[in-house]
Each structure stands twice: as C-alpha cells, then as structure tokens.
C-alpha cells in the first residue's frame, strides 16, 4: 500500500514561546514533528512493514519544515515532498496545496494528526479529504487493513466507535494509537540519501486559489499571573476576607 502522511513542523512543547509585534517569534526555536502527526507516521510505517508499499511524508513551510521532513525520513519514510511556502498559509490554502500534491501521487491512504499542538484547529486534514472526495475518519486509536477496506476504532469523547472505510481514504491519528519510534543512527544516515522533492505554491495552484481568505490580525502573550495572597486570622476571618476580595476586587460575587 502506498501511503502519504501529512506532517507539520511545530515549536517543541518544551521551548519558551515569545510574542513580538503581534507575531510568535519563530527564529532560534527548536521545531519538531507535530506529536499527533507522529502517531500517523508510526501507523503508516507499521502498515508498510506488515504489508509492503511506500510511505511518503508531505509538508508545507519554510526551511525548518525541510529539517522536520528529514527527521521523518530518518524514522523510516521512503520519500518526502516539501511545499516551500513564505509565511504561514491559512487552512484553506494549505489544504488546497496538500490536496493537489496528493493528486500527483498514487496514494491509497493518507494519515495525518488529529490536530496540531500550536493552532489546534483540526481543519486541514478534513478539508483535504473533502477536496479529494475521499472518506475520512478522525481521532483513530486502532486501525487494520483487510480485504481492500480499513477497519478503524475512533475516540468519541470518552467512548469509541467502530467504522469501516473503503480505500482510498484519509485518517487522523489520536493519542494512544501507538508509540512513535525514535530515529536510529542508521536511519539518520540513510535519510541524507533519500529523495526530498521540492514544490512551490505556483506549481500547484494558480491565481486566486493561492490567495488566503483569512488573516491573523495578531497574537498576544497571556498576562503575567499576579502573586498569590495569603490570608491571616481565624478561619472565620479568612472566609470573610476572601468573600470581600471576591466581591470587591475580583468582582465575581454580587452583593446581596
């Protein structure tokens, strides 16, 4: 089975995030494969190891995206496709770019992450499935291919659902699907020789299709958390002071 995996390069969760002039500062920060996309990549690699085929990773972004694709190749992907973009395309444009890149391949299955840990919108994969006209199932926690179909179990907010999908199809991976592997030294060395195809938005889309329909106006860092206040006196005095603070300062209680 020939499988494509959509991955996104995101700021590592242990990196400090700073905001300058209404934008998140990306320079000098470590970027990694979006953790949910790693579950999808691991699922694709296991399917290839069990039944043969190829795994191709696709992503859109700047030079750091190319570095992230190399990590995916080191994990075991066979090929990578990098759509070199300037800035951050909105979900509509990104979906159009990825869908068009997928059409250029002969894929039977596309894996992606359930959401990204930076924006958390969970839009792109669903949009891609709709553009391709493929069946889609999200938040997958178990999957097996059998008889030209996919049998999946998806997380349904604390419960689970069992679905069967005909191929080609698109799935998004949820936490708990598997435990992603780490790139081994041999894989890192092999990744340097594996193909990384480079595309531009102009090669995939024309005219107005490549124009964003939404714009991020700005970002703001959360306000500094004020220091805690310790209340003294007896329990009765502490309760009375707490109620007064909630009523007069926090203004979350109304006076009777």
Image (cartoon, rainbow, N blue to C red):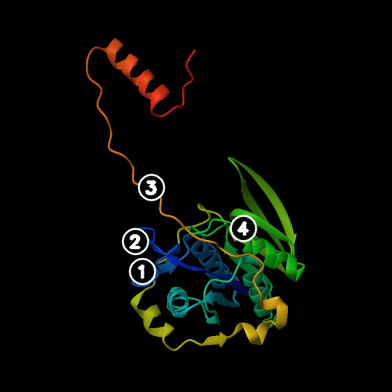
- Between residues 126 and 208, which one lies in front from this camera angle? 208
Mark 4 element type: strand
The spot of residue 150 in percent (x, y) is: 69, 61
- Between residues 32 and 40, which one lies in front from this camera angle? 32
Q: In terms of sequence position, does the residue under pointer 3 or pointer 1 come before the other?
A: 1
Image vertical order of residue 193 relative to residue 167, above or below: below
Disc 1 and disc 2: Cα gap in Å?
7 Å
Q: In terms of sequence position, does the residue under pointer 1 or pointer 4 come before the other?
A: 1
Q: Which residue is mark 4?
A: 143
Relative side of 116 to 53, left or right: left
The spot of residue 214 in percent (x, y) is: 63, 65
Q: Which residue is mark 2?
A: 15
Q: Residues within 10 Å of mark 4 (few under 14, many from 20)?
A: some
The spot of residue 188 in percent (x, y) is: 38, 79
Q: In the rendered image, which quarter contains the N terminus?
A: bottom right
Disc 3 and disc 2: Cα gap in Å?
18 Å
User: Which residue is painted at 34% across and 20% down in the image?
Assistant: 242
Q: In terms of sequence position, does the residue under pointer 4 or pointer 2 come before the other?
A: 2
The numbered dot on residue 30 is 1
Disc 3 and disc 1: Cα gap in Å?
24 Å
Q: Are marks 3 and 2 in contact (CB under 8 Å)?
A: no
Residue 198 seen in this snapshot: yes
Disc 4 and disc 2: Cα gap in Å?
33 Å
Q: Nearer the viewer, mark 4 or mark 2?
A: 2
Mark 3 element type: loop
């Amino acid at each position: 089975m020939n499988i494509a995996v959509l991955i996104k390069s995101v700021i590592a969760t242990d990196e400090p995030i700073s905001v300058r002039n209404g934008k998140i500062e990306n320079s000098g920060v470590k970027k990694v494969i979006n953790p949910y996309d790693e579950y999808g990549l691991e699922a694709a690699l296991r399917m290839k190891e069990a039944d043969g085929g190829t795994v191709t990773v696709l992503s859109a972004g700047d030079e750091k995206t190319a570095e992230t694709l190399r990590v995916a190749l080191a994990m075991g992907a066979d090929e990578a496709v990098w759509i070199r973009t300037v800035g951050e395309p909105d979900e509509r444009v990104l979906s159009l770019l990825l869908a068009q890149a997928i059409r250029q391949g002969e894929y039977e299955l596309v894996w992606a992450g359930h959401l990204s840990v930076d924006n958390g919108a969970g839009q792109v994969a669903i949009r891609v499935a709709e553009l391709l006209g493929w069946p889609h199932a999200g938040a997958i926690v178990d999957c097996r291919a059998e008889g030209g179909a996919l049998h999946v179990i998806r997380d349904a907010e604390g419960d689970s659902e069992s679905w069967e999908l005909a191929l080609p199809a698109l799935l998004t991976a949820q936490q708990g699907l598997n435990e992603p592997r780490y790139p081994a030294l041999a894989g890192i060395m092999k990744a340097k020789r594996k193909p990384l195809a480079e595309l531009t938005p102009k090669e995939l889309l024309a005219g107005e299709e490549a124009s964003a329909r939404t714009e991020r106006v700005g970002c703001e860092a959360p306000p500094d958390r004020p220091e805690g206040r310790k209340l003294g006196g007896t329990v009765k005095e502490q309760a009375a002071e707490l109620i007064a603070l909630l009523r007069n300062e926090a203004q979350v209680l109304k006076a009777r």
